[in-house]
């Protein structure tokens, strides 16, 4: 696993700091998920959006995950919107970020029916031209990142639900062997990358996963380069397949790696504590199934925060599918993942304060401070910190804040002094910054 950890100490120190007031914590805070996963030689990854990799989003992505998958940045429509004109900016940014943070990268995805450029889908191609387009695309993109990516999702979503081949540009033009040809081209372009076929609704034993099983078995028998299968795992609350572990095991028994590549567990909105508790149990079930099978290399979540999840757009009325809420607070699902990776389980008792940068632009940013109480409550509160790099408060809401020198002192507004057991209060502010914008330690008083 290419996941040597470098240069993280500052990020680990300053981000997501939660200080406790009241009863002492039941246990020390959990180690970041990536440390727990490293200790088990497993991947814990997340899909990311390149433009968001600053502020709190970037800090969590770096601190908690040992692998990244570009959510959209490496798709054909993103990298070659016009024929022969390439845009690698976001893909490069994500790969560079991963390398700076000792994370591996899962390339996603080369040959798919969706998110292709219109010049490709609207073109009229002979069989030979189509084959050339596919293999050139693979050579160009895989070649660009040669030696730097751990894994490629070479072919994405080749099957229908009944196990027949999906009728796509590729299948219709080249026949079922487009899959073998794509894998062969990818191996030639980067011999060290692990090559996967990835699909959804193949998590349990069913017609679709059996078709995938038969395909990869025959590819192996033919000597076609294939290293693993990706089970996307876009799951629905209450519907984790009972045969998940058994299914992972049967692929492993073929001598293939298995990865859970796009885990999310969606629910009908609004979420509530019962649904979130059930979601946590189901995240744990999925994690446990992967941890139990040696050849299951790990789990990647499809976005780590609800604010960066595809679910609400694609499945209207559903959401809350990831391990962090929209304000970057870890949900029960986060603790469940930690637990499955061998971390501590008891959430701390007391009131904690979390500071996050929710939006940052040149010269300014919006910050948010959130006080959560569990097993304790507050009748009034103060939150104090020191800006370490000359940041200057310009405005605050839902709190009375003053800044003197670098010291910022905030106290509750008349209407939000009470934080009940199990409840939270959030306030926000705008401030200026230049040079750097480190996250301060906030004390609750
Ligand atoms: C999704 C992205 O998350 C969205 O931002 C985009 O609009 C559509 O695609 N299966 C896959 C992923 O393999 O590439 C998809 O990602 C989700 C389903």
Image (cartoon, grey):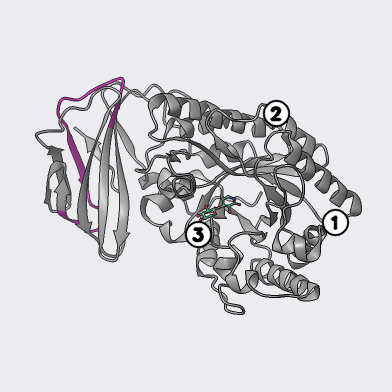
Task: Kindly report the distance in space between the C-alpha atoms of the residues bearing marks 2 and 3.
Answer: 36 Å
Q: Is 318 one of the magenta-colored residues?
A: no
Is the CB of the residue bearing disc 3 within 8 angstroms of ligand 1?
no
Dividing the picture into quarters, in which one does residue 363 lie?
Answer: bottom left
Q: Mark 2 points at which residue?
A: 243
Query: On the rendered image, what quadrant is the C terminus found in?
Result: top left
Q: Residue at x 74, y 67 (%)?
A: 189
Q: Mark 2: which secondary structure? A: loop
Q: Earlier in the sequence, mark 1 or mark 3?
A: 3
Q: Name the residue under label 3.
A: 97
Count up the numbered dots.
Answer: 3
Q: Mark 1 points at which residue?
A: 224
Q: Is 381 one of the magenta-colored residues?
A: yes
Task: Kindly report the distance in space between the C-alpha atoms of the residues bearing marks 2 and 1.
Answer: 28 Å
Determine whether, in the image, residue 376 is placed left or right of residue 227: left
Q: Residue at x 64, y 69 (%)?
A: 121
Q: Earlier in the sequence, mark 2 or mark 3?
A: 3
């Amino acid at each position: 696993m290419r996941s040597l950890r470098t240069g993280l100490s500052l990020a680990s120190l300053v981000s997501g700091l939660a200080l406790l007031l009241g009863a002492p914590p039941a246990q020390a805070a959990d180690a970041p998920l990536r440390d727990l996963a490293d200790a088990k030689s497993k991947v814990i990854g997340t899909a990311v959006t390149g433009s968001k990799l600053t502020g709190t989003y970037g800090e969590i992505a770096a601190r908690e995950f040992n692998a990244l998958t570009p959510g959209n940045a490496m798709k054909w429509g993103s990298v070659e919107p016009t024929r022969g004109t390439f845009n690698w900016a976001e893909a490069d940014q994500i790969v560079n970020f991963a390398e700076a943070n000792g994370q591996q990268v899962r390339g996603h995805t080369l040959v798919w029916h969706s998110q292709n450029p219109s010049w490709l889908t609207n073109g009229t191609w002979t069989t030979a031209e189509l084959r050339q387009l596919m293999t050139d695309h693979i050579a160009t993109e895989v070649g660009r990142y040669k030696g730097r990516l751990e894994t490629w999702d070479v072919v994405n979503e080749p099957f229908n639900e009944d196990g027949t081949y999906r009728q796509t540009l590729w299948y219709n033009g080249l026949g079922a062997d487009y899959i073998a040809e794509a894998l062969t081209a990818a191996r030639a372009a980067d011999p060290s990358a692990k090559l996967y076929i990835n699909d959804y609704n193949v998590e349990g034993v069913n017609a679709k996963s059996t078709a995938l099983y038969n395909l990869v078995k025959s590819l192996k028998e033919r000597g076609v380069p294939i290293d693993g299968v990706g089970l996307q795992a876009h799951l629905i609350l209450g519907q984790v397949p009972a045969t998940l572990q058994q299914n992972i095991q049967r692929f492993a028994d073929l001598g293939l790696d298995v990865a859970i590549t796009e885990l999310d567990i969606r629910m009908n909105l609004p979420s509530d504590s019962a649904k979130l508790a059930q979601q946590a149990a189901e995240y744990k079930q999925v994690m446990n199934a992967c941890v139990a099978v040696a050849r299951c290399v790990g789990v990647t979540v499809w976005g780590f925060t609800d604010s960066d999840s595809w679910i609400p757009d694609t499945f209207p009325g559903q959401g809350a599918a990831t391990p962090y809420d929209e304000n970057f607070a870890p949900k029960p699902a986060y603790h469940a993942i930690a637990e499955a990776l061998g971390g501590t389980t008891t959430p701390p008792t007391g009131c904690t304060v979390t500071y996050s940068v929710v939006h940052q632009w040149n010269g300014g940013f919006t910050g948010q401070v959130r006080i959560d109480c569990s097993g304790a409550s507050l009748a009034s509160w103060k939150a104090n910190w020191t800006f370490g790099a000359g940041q200057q408060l310009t405005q605050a809401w839902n709190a009375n804040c003053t800044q003197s020198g670098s010291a910022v002192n905030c106290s509750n507004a008349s209407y939000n002094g009470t934080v009940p057991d199990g409840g939270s209060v959030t306030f926000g502010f705008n401030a200026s910054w230049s040079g750097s914008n480190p996250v301060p330690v906030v004390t609750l008083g």
